[in-house]
């Protein structure tokens, strides 16, 4: 059964997938830093949704939908319209190209990102494995 | 959506004289000690208009470290140039690009240089790249490879902003290049052209450049190696390296670079020698992936080599590369590089970890996991065909 994106149930499904992924564990061994995935309105999604993920050395320690943006102060923020997220998650847009061209905006410690690019790749791979229902 | 970035390019005999047209106040020439001794810096300087003051920084070492970038940026801060002129091989050019970013944006951590953030370059200075090798293509790319000495790792970084304003390809600058350096750097260009054509970012703008560079390199690199004063061959190789740079610089390199960066940082193997050694092994490895993603048939057709299926074409291409490497008396496996079994075993975890997270590894059409990376290193050690 498909899980609606973006939602609390969806980010929790991704947490479960990541924590079962040997490829992510190998790639993200040195990763330290939690994330806000910020999904901006587009199509029938009429408000911004923030999904939080605490990523630490190859494991996801916590995942939830956040209604108050000040609830956490994450090390990284990745934001973009829901239609762009959909393109990346359905492999129609390369995540690196999306970030380099500014279609998805990444903020945070870029040294961590440049030294652990494979972790980012495996993170996106995980997204693509979740059976997802998109609002666009 | 994607970009194609290119410098203005001046090429051919007399290209250095373009420097006479520069307008400005102060140029910092970035280079290395050998090039200063050999008189190349003086030659470059002699073309600059007399009203441009010149300062020279020659502290760049092979595989430049993050510390060198910081040190060089302080030199630029001290003299405040409006032109940065990088004269050298890939190490010098990459170092100068990194220094340029820190000069214009002093708060940047060099290990964090990335294509996502903007640095506001050209508020203070513009950049001229004058290559003295024919291979790295750094004169036409926005790539920067720096060495993190503490982590014994190379960082494949970059920013589209550091594409040089001018690339000056004067064949006079490479006529004295010794045979080993000619082979190492020329094979780096071959690796760029082949990986640029087969990477996941390949595109219509880069395909033709990569294919033509491959043809030029197979034809002219052996001539340059056998007879360094073959002017025609040198000129074509210089162009081929820059064209391959335009190709892979806009479509990225791939797995041979991921493995080569990792090996190079740990065992201090010259960049071109390392990536070219891995190239045929990585082609064989990719041949075991999804045939829909492979493009070896087009490559072998361009070279007039056999290979009707992607798999056959991959093996045909790997064979042709090894033949070329033999003709250039290059090492074909890690043992011939002087690496012992014990040393490889000892360093394997670091080699695998660094290759796994290299920015170029993930551009491969088949991305290896830890186990496959180990097997790739061992295949390259034994000189064994990759068939897993
Ligand atoms: Zn290279």
Image: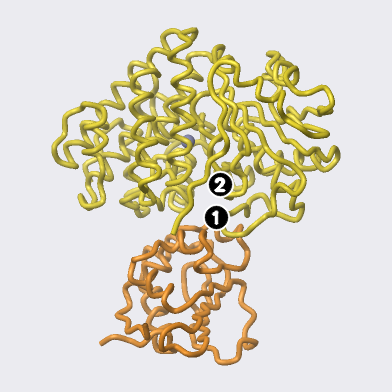
Q: Residue at x 58, y 14 (%)?
A: B172
Report which residue position mark 1 lands on: A115
Question: Along the horizontal axis of the image, is A44 left or right of B15?
Answer: left
> What color does chain B have in the rendering?
yellow
Query: In the image, is the residue at mark 1 within 8 Å of ligand 1 by its beta carbon?
Result: no
Q: In what element is the residue under mark 2?
A: strand
> What color does chain A have in the rendering?
orange
Looking at the image, residue B380 lies above or below residue B40: below
Residues at marks 2 and 1 touching, judged by CB atoms closer than 8 Å: yes
Question: Along the horizontal axis of the image, is B120 left or right of B281?
Answer: right
Chain letter of the residue beneath label 1 in the structure image: A
Looking at the image, residue B294 lies above or below residue B132: below
Q: Position of residue A101 (x, y in %)?
A: 51, 60
Q: Residue at x 53, y 61 (%)?
A: A30
Q: In which quarter of the image is residue A12?
A: bottom left
Mark 1 neighbour density, 10 Å: few (under 14) some (14–19) many (20 or more):
many
Mark 2 neighbour density, 10 Å: few (under 14) some (14–19) many (20 or more):
many
Q: Residue at x 44, y 7 (%)?
A: B227
Report which residue position mark 2 lands on: B155
Q: Residue furthest left?
A: B308
Looking at the image, residue B205 lies above or below residue A128: above
Foreground residue, A24 or A43? Answer: A43
Foreground residue, A36 or B41? Answer: B41
């Amino acid at each position: 059964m498909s899980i609606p994106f973006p939602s609390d149930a969806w980010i929790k499904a991704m947490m479960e997938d990541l924590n079962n992924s040997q490829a992510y564990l190998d790639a993200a061994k040195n990763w330290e830093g939690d994330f806000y995935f910020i999904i901006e309105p587009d199509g029938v999604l009429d408000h911004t949704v923030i999904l939080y993920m605490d990523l630490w050395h190859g494991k996801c320690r916590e995942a939830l939908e956040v209604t108050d943006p000040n609830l956490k102060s994450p090390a990284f923020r990745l934001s973009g319209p829901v239609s762009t997220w959909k393109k990346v998650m359905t492999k129609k847009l390369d995540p690196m190209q999306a970030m380099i061209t500014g279609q998805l905006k990444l903020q945070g410690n870029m040294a961590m990102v440049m030294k652990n690019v494979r972790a980012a790749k495996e993170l996106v791979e995980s997204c693509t494995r979740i059976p997802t229902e998109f609002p666009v | 959506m994607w970009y194609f970035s290119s410098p203005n390019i001046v090429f051919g005999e007399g290209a250095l004289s373009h420097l006479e047209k520069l307008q400005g106040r102060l140029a910092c020439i970035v280079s290395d000690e050998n090039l200063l001794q050999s008189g190349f810096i003086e030659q470059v300087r002699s073309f600059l208009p007399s009203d441009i003051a010149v300062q020279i920084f020659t502290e760049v070492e092979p595989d430049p470290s993050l510390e060198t970038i910081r040190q060089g940026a302080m030199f630029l801060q001290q003299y405040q140039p409006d032109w940065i002129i990088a004269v050298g091989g890939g190490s010098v050019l990459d170092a100068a690009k990194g220094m340029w970013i820190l000069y214009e944006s002093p708060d940047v951590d060099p290990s964090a240089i990335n294509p996502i953030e903007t640095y506001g370059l050209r508020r203070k200075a513009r950049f001229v790249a004058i290559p003295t090798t024919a291979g790295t293509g750094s004169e036409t790319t926005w790539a920067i490879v720096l060495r993190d000495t503490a982590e014994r790792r190379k960082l494949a970084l970059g920013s589209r902003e550091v594409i040089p304003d001018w690339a000056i390809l004067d064949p006079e600058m490479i006529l004295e290049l010794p045979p080993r350096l000619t082979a190492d750097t020329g094979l780096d260009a071959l690796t760029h052209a082949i990986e640029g054509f087969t990477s996941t970012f390949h595109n219509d703008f880069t395909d033709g450049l990569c294919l033509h560079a491959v043809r030029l390199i197979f034809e002219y690199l052996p001539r340059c190696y056998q007879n360094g004063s073959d002017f025609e061959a040198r000129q074509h190789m210089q162009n081929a390296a820059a064209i391959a740079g335009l190709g892979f610089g806009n479509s990225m390199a791939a797995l041979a670079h991921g493995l080569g960066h990792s090996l190079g940082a740990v065992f201090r193997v010259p960049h071109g020698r390392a990536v070219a050694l891995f190239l045929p092994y990585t082609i064989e490895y990719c041949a075991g992936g999804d045939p829909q993603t492979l493009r070896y048939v087009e490559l072998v057709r361009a070279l007039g080599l056999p290979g009707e299926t992607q798999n056959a074409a991959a093996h045909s291409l790997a064979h042709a590369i090894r033949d070329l490497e033999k003709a250039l008396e290059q090492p074909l496996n890690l043992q011939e590089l002087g690496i012992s079994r014990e040393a490889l075993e000892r360093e394997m975890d670091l080699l695998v970890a660094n290759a796994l997270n290299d920015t170029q590894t993930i551009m491969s059409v088949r991305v290896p996991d830890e186990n496959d990376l180990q097997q790739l290193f061992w295949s390259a050690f034994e000189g064994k065909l990759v068939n897993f």
